[in-house]
Image (spheres, coloured by chain):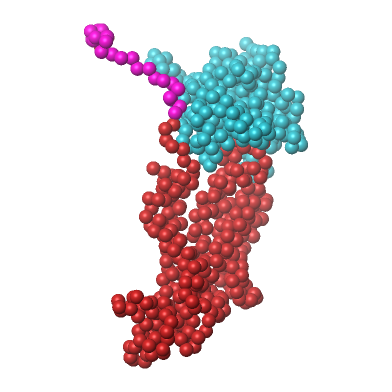
Amino acid sequence: MAEKLLEIKNLKQYFNVGTKNEVRAVDDVTFDIYKGETLGIVGESGCGKSTTGRTIIRLYDATGGEVIYDGVDVHAKKSKKELKAFNRKMQMIFQDPYASLNPRMKVLDIIAEGLDIHGLVKNSKERTARVHELLETVGLNREHANRYPHEFSGGQRQRLGIARALAVEPEFIIADEPISALDVSIQAQVVNLLKELQEERGLTYLFIAHDLSMVKYISDRIGVMHFGKLVEIGPAETIYTAPLHPYTQSLLSAIPLPDPAYERSRVRKSYDPTTHKYLKDEEVIMREVTPGHLVLCSQREFDAFAK
Amino acid sequence: MTTNMKKLPKDSFERITIDSSHAERISKPSLSFWQDAWLRIRKNKAAIVSMFILVFIVFMAFVGPFMVEHDPEDVKVAHASLPPKIPGLEKLGIFDGVGKLGSKTVNLYELKKVEVNYWFGTDSLGRDLFSRLWKGTQISLIIAFVAAVIDVVIGVIYGGISGYYGGRTDDVMQRIVEVLIGVPTLVIVILMIMIMKPGIWSIIIAISITGWIGMSRIVRGQVLKYKTQEFVLAAKTLGASDTRIISKHLLPNIMAIIVINMMFTIPTAIFFEAFLSFIGLGLQAPKASLGTLINDGYKFIEYQPHILFFPAAIISLLMIAFNLIGDGLRDALDPKMKD
C-alpha cells in the first residue's frame, strides 16, 4: 500500500463547548490519506464534511485529536516559519466561487497572493509571468489577469480559485465542495481539470462533496459521514458495490439514473439510526471488515457483516 | 424524421466549428470598482448638481473673503446696518442699497455717505457680511470635516478591532459603546464646552466625542460580515498575516460604506455646530460660523431679513448637497444596483 501522507486520529471539533447549544460538528473521526490518491468524503448537508476539511487545514483549532501531515502534527504549536512552510504544502479550494474571490482585487493580485506571502517571486515581471502560466494551466487566457472577479462566470471563477491554490505548489489540496455551486456542464470541466492536475503534479486530494456520482468518478477511496461521525470508509468500488452501513446503503439508494426502467424499480431506503439497537455497554468503533474497508459498528454487527 | 433528412441535399448544409479558444473571452471592458461607481453616479442628476453646488460653496469659502476689500472682523460703526448693494444690479431693483429707516424707504448708502459697496450688506457693528458669510462657511466646513475625519479614524479602528478579534474583546468593547450611547449626546457636549475654552477645537472635540460610535458600529458589522467570507479564509490558508487580511481584504471592501457614512456625518456635524453656536455655546465674536451668523441674523429678521437669509441659504444648500451626494454614492456603490 502507498505511503501515508496524512493521518487523522480521533479528530474532534466542537462548537460552543460547555454551553447548552454545544455542537459536535466532527466527533472522533479517524482516517488516513495516502500519497497521490483522492479521498472523497460524502454525507448530507451539515454532517461535518466541510468542518473536517477546515479543521485539517487549521482554519479552526481542533477541540481534540491529531492531524499528522508527513509525520508532523499540524495542530501543535508552531513558529511562523513552520506555519508558512505548512501553508505551502496544504491548500484549499472553496465551495462558493462567488464568495471565494475578493471582489476588490484584480485576478493578477488574487492569484499572486500566495506568491507574495511566501516570497516566491523576485520581481513584478516574474510575478506576472508566473500568474500567466497559472492561468493557462487552468485553461484561462493571460488577458484575464487584469480583470476583476465579477467579470467571470462561475466555472471560470472556480478555476481562478484552483490557480490561486496551485500558485504555492502544494502537495495536498482540500477541495471543499468545489463543484456543488456550478451547473452540470461546468462541473465536468472543473473535475476533469482537477484530475489532469493530479496526474501532472502528483497531487493528493481530499474531495468533499454531496454528489455521489461525481465522487465515484473522481475518488479512489470514499468516506461516508453522518452527524459528525465517519460511518464507513473504503475503496470506491467496494463502497458502491457492497455498502455495509445502513446509512451508506440509504445514500446509494438515492442516486437517480437516467433510465426509466431502473427508476421505476428503484426503492429509496431511509436511514433510521435507531435500527442499530446499540446496547449501552456496546463499543461502537470503526472495524475493518475487508482489507481497507472500515465500518462503524458494534461487535454484534461486525459478526453479522462477516457472514 | 430520419428518412426525410436523407432527402435533403447535402450541400445546403455547412458545418460550423466552434473555436474553443474564444470560449473564455470576455469582451466587456475591464472596469475597476470606482470606475464602475463613477459611471453609475454620472446618471444621477441630483448628485451631480449637488456636487457642483458643493464645489462652488467650498471654493467660495476659501476665496470669498479675499474677493472684497473688507475684513470679516473689522468693526466700522459708521457703516452699521447697511443693506446689500452690488454695483450693476441696482437697475433691477435688487441689491441697490435701499433699505428702511424708520418707516421711510431710502437709499442708506447715499444717506450715510458711504462710498464703498457692501455686496451682502453689513451687520449692526458695520462688519461686511459677504466676507463674514464665506469666512463663517469656511470655519463651519473645517469643523465638520475635521470632526468627520476624527469620527472615521476612531470609528474604523474601534469597530475594526472589535469585529475582527471578536470574542471577549468584542464583548467588552461593545458594552463600553452601549454605555456611551446611553448618555444623551447633548449633555456630554454641553459639559465639554463648559469645561473647555470656547473655540474651534473644543467644538470639534465635543462633536467627535460621541460621533464615532455610529461609524464604529457600522464598521464592526461589516468586518463581522466579511471576515467569515471564503476569500478571507482562502487568504488565511495561504498564510496571510492579520495586517495583510485587514489592509488588503477587509478595508477595501468596507471602504464604500465608510465613504457613504462620512458623507452623512459631515452635514450632521455642520448642523450640530450651527446648533451649538445658535444656543450660544459655539464660537465667540468676532469669529464667525454659519451658526453664529444665523444667530445674529434672526434678531433682525423683521427689519433686515438679508442678514439671516444668506447664511440660512448656504447652510440649507450644504445640507441638501451632502445628503444628495451621499444618497447618490450609496446607490452607485451598491453592486446590486448594477445594470
For residue B311, say whether it is visible: yes
Q: Nearer the viewer, residue B211 or B103?
A: B103
Q: Residue at x 52, y 20 (%)?
A: A192
Which residues are drawn in magenta? B3-25
**Side of B223 relative to A120 (left or right):** left
Point out the residue furthest to the front here.
Answer: B115
State which quarter of the image contains the N terminus of chain A.
top right
Q: Nearer the viewer, residue A272 or B140?
A: B140
In the rendered image, residue B47, in percent from the top left (x then y), is placed at 41, 56
Tell how many labels. Answer: 0
* Image vertical order of residue B89 relative to residue B174, above or below: below
In the rendered image, residue A182, in percent from the top left (x then y), is placed at 47, 29
Q: Residue at x 63, y 55 (%)?
A: B158
Q: Is residue B10 magenta?
A: yes
**Side of A27 relative to A94 (left or right):** right
**Side of A117 relative to B152 (left or right):** right
> Which chain did the image draw in red?
B
In the rendered image, residue B144, in percent from the top left (x then y), is placed at 54, 65
Q: Quadrant of residue B226?
A: top right
Q: Is residue A52 magenta?
A: no
**Side of B32 relative to A40 (left or right):** left
Q: Residue at x 54, y 30 (%)?
A: A160
State which quarter of the image contains the C terminus of chain A.
top right
For residue B302, say whether it is visible: no
Q: Quadrant of residue B313?
A: bottom left
Q: Residue at x 62, y 58 (%)?
A: B154
Q: Nearer the viewer, residue A185 or B206?
A: B206
> Which chain did the image draw in cyan?
A
